[in-house]
Amino acid sequence: MHTYSELSKPEAKEILAELMKKYSEYKSKNLSLDMTRGKPSTEQLDLSTDMLGDSAYKTGKGVDCRNYGMLDGIPEIKELFAELLEVSPDEIIVGGNSSLNMMHDCVVNALLMGVSEGSTPWVRQGKLKFLCPVPGYDRHFAITEKFGFEMIPVPMDGEGPDMDTVRRFAENDRSVKGIWCVPKYSNPGGITYSDRVVREFAALKPAAEDFRIFWDNAYAVHDFTDEPDKLLNIFDACKEYGSGDMVYEFASTSKISFSGAGVACLAASKENCKYLKKQLSIQTIGYDKLNQLRHASFFRDAAGVRAQMKKHAAIIAPKFRTVIDILEKELGGKGIASWTNPKGGYFISFDMPGCARRITQLASEAGLSLTPAGSTFPYGRDEADSNIRIAPTLPSVEELAVATGLFCVCAEIAYLEKMLSE
């Protein structure tokens, strides 16, 4: 098979004409397909429905979860998260249903109050900057954009963020206050940070004493192969350098139980937890302990969570295989695009330089909704116009086959149009 770059213009025009016929056939079907966000399917949500039938309201130690108190979470749910994240329960603060909300609160708290007793609030320190591995999570970038940070893109490779870039900015500029990280099955690339990268994060010597690593471990247990990626515990790595205060780790059950009614947590050093709980005590009397108890009773321990994730994997893995197989069949060997093949998480990262906006436009006009091109970069600006995040989890396998077939037609059309215009 010849790569598309080897085609003559007459050959390219002939292939484009055939693709436009296929595209018209897709448009005539009046499709309505959604691959925009990493939403669990109804079948996944049904896995935890039995949790809702539990009417218990007292913890094993007799705490009445209907009442006030237990600001940082009931013991059972703290112990569950501690086991999953390999920290101690007194290094866990349990929040509401959203880890993103906890990240937002940590940024706001640092802006207004500082990161520790006696530290200067970020907002009083002039221009602020934040490091953003790309491609990355659009909702992370939205938080720092909202509060006026200058966001600095950090390129990713197969091991994680480029640490030379991270060091260059973090260790030489006091206005750099933090970095966003999705260290396991990154959003959207599906990359798990290597042991080397984790250790280099732990070894950072930021110019700003109040620099924080926002370690969003959203997919800590979201494996769907028999040989899942392993992520080194960053707090263990930090012990060697005495840098544990530098890290805020976040997780939730949003894609384990219910995406809109799970339980979120923050893992941090004891010193950070003490300070954050002081701030939290003014914000709330406590989060939903009945929901915490439902989750703790349903899962019981980390083994229970992992057993649940095997059920998720049985649903999700065929969907990822469907998308990858069709991408390989339709686009493989043509030399026009690349994509990731992750072992877990919720996304596939697709790259075709100079074509992302056109692909999403064509797809939208034919009834396929995709995350907007550029969303995986700060300010929505992908200078290479290359990256598209594909979210396979919500549609059925049958819908995914149609959606991915259409996506491939759109990708080929976009590439040939660009080629013929040059």
Image: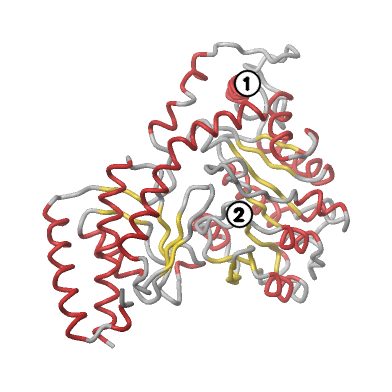
Q: Residue at x 82, y 52 (%)?
A: 244
Q: Are marks 2 and 1 in contact (CB under 8 Å)?
A: no
Above or below, 102 against 159 in this view is above
User: In which quarter of the view is residue 97 placed?
Assistant: top right
Q: Residues within 10 Å of mark 2 (few under 14, many from 20)?
A: many
Q: Nearer the viewer, residue 413 or 94?
A: 413
Q: Earlier in the sequence, mark 2 or mark 1?
A: 2
Q: Say which residue appears at 15% left-offset and 68% top-offset.
A: 20
Label 2, label 1: how far apart the Cα atoms are = 27 Å
Q: Position of residue 360 (x, y in %)?
A: 31, 63
Mark carried by residue 182: 2
Label 1: element kind? helix
Of badges 2 and 1, the one in the foreground is: 2
| Element carrying mark 2 | loop
Left or right: residue 334 compared with residue 276: left
Q: Is residue 259 above or below residue 56?
A: below
Residue assigned mark 1: 293
* Residue 4 x %, y %: 30, 78
Residue 289 spot, x, y in % from top left = 63, 23
Q: In this image, 245 relative to 15: left or right?
A: right
Q: Quadrant of the N terminus?
A: bottom left
Please name the residue shown 65% across and 70% down the image: 162
Quadrant occupied by the C terminus:
bottom left
